[in-house]
Image: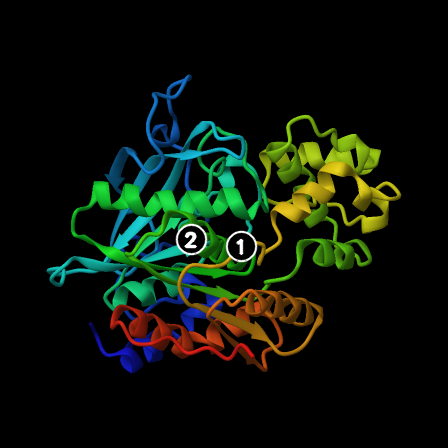
Amino acid sequence: MRVFPKVLKALWPALFVGAAAFAQSPTRTPASPSYVPRMLPLTKFYETPNPLPVGKPGELIRFEPFDGYDLPSEISAFRILYHSLSPSGEDVAVSGVVLLPEGIPPAGGWPVIAWAHDFLGSARKCAPSLLRNLNEGPLLSMYVGLGYAVVASDYAGLGTRFPNAALDTRSNALDVINAVAAARAALPQLGIRWVVVGYAQGSPVAIGVAEAVNGIDDPSYLGAIGISSLAEPEELFEQVAQGPSYSMLVLLARGIKTVYPEFRVEEILTDRGIRLYEYVSDACDASSGQTPAAGEMLKPNWENNRYVKEFFARNTLGRKPAFGPLLLISGDTGMRSALTTTTVARLCAQKDHALFVKYPAFNESAVLGDSISEQVSWIRARFADLLAPSNCP
């Protein structure tokens, strides 16, 4: 692997200003004076037959090399399409991306980092694989530059035509797990050993992967990192409903509808909320140019709806033990930090092997950047078979 400090020094500015500032290596998409759209077109690669040919979860449907991302020229990118499961257990197709380092892989293949992305929307075109910078391209490029292959699922319904289970940890976690198997089928230079890293809304997905792996006992899985936003779902949305935010509430309703088709969104959303709910089916910006208060979106006692309560319970971390060690990273101030601390306490109470680290950062992006050295050291230690630290009581 390359030397970490050199790579970190080169990539540090890019982590905060996006892939356009990633100037340490030439990219496949040279800068042009003309406007270059941030989003890529939804091509035939993402289309699947209806009905979908039967396949087991993690079985590869197809893959293709793709050179349209803003990535360093030494990174090879491949899009994958594979089988996974819907919340009701039905066969669905999921898209994603695999990033490979240059050169000959080490003995046993490239070690794998599975990436659980933060929330971008619930429309098909909101898939990270349809963004030129893959949403977190500089960070993912850093991992690849250190000698890891990155497997990044879009989650079902982002990219493919299936309903997106927005904010549903369990469904998204299974999509991440199945992406690793599909990536290995497409690219035999990948090793079998892997860790998962999640950021923001991807953070609970990463821990959800650890809890799901506990049921299948995969010895090649080595651990999970959750970076920010490990909040109890019910407490988080109670806080959101008391503030000016509205987009997450609309998308919460969409996630509940996907998990529980019998749920009627008009039971919790006002007429104004329903209009925005319909808008997000084809948009990545949930606002549609509007800024309503949460109180204008929700009906009274919305949180006591049967399906809302079941969705919250389904997505509460710590209901089953996690397999393997956990690294949990958070800021040290703000409401979400306090809620994350509550979740970590529950994980520790059930004897999960967790290391909880706080950084004095003012937002999630700063936490992500400030913790890079911690992330990489922990990942390297897992692949080196070192004992994982824990600071649970």
The image shows residue 40 at horizontal and vertical percentages of 41, 42
Residue marked by disc 1: 320
Q: Relative to residue 19, is residue 170 depicted above or below? A: above
Q: Amino acid at mark 1?
A: Lys
Q: Residues within 10 Å of mark 2 (few under 14, many from 20)?
A: some
The image shows residue 112 at horizontal and vertical percentages of 28, 58
The residue nearer to you, when weighing 193 against 73, is 193
Residue 79 seen in the figure: yes
The image shows residue 158 at horizontal and vertical percentages of 48, 39
Q: Amino acid at mark 2?
A: Asn
Callouts 2 and 1 close, C-beta under 8 Å = yes
Q: How far apart are labels 2 and 1 at the CA level? A: 8 Å
* Residue found 38% across the figure and 24% down from its top: 48
* Residue found 79% across the figure and 57% down from its top: 244
Q: Is residue 105 left or right of residue 383?
A: left
* Residue found 16% across the figure and 47% down from its top: 188
Residue marked by disc 2: 214
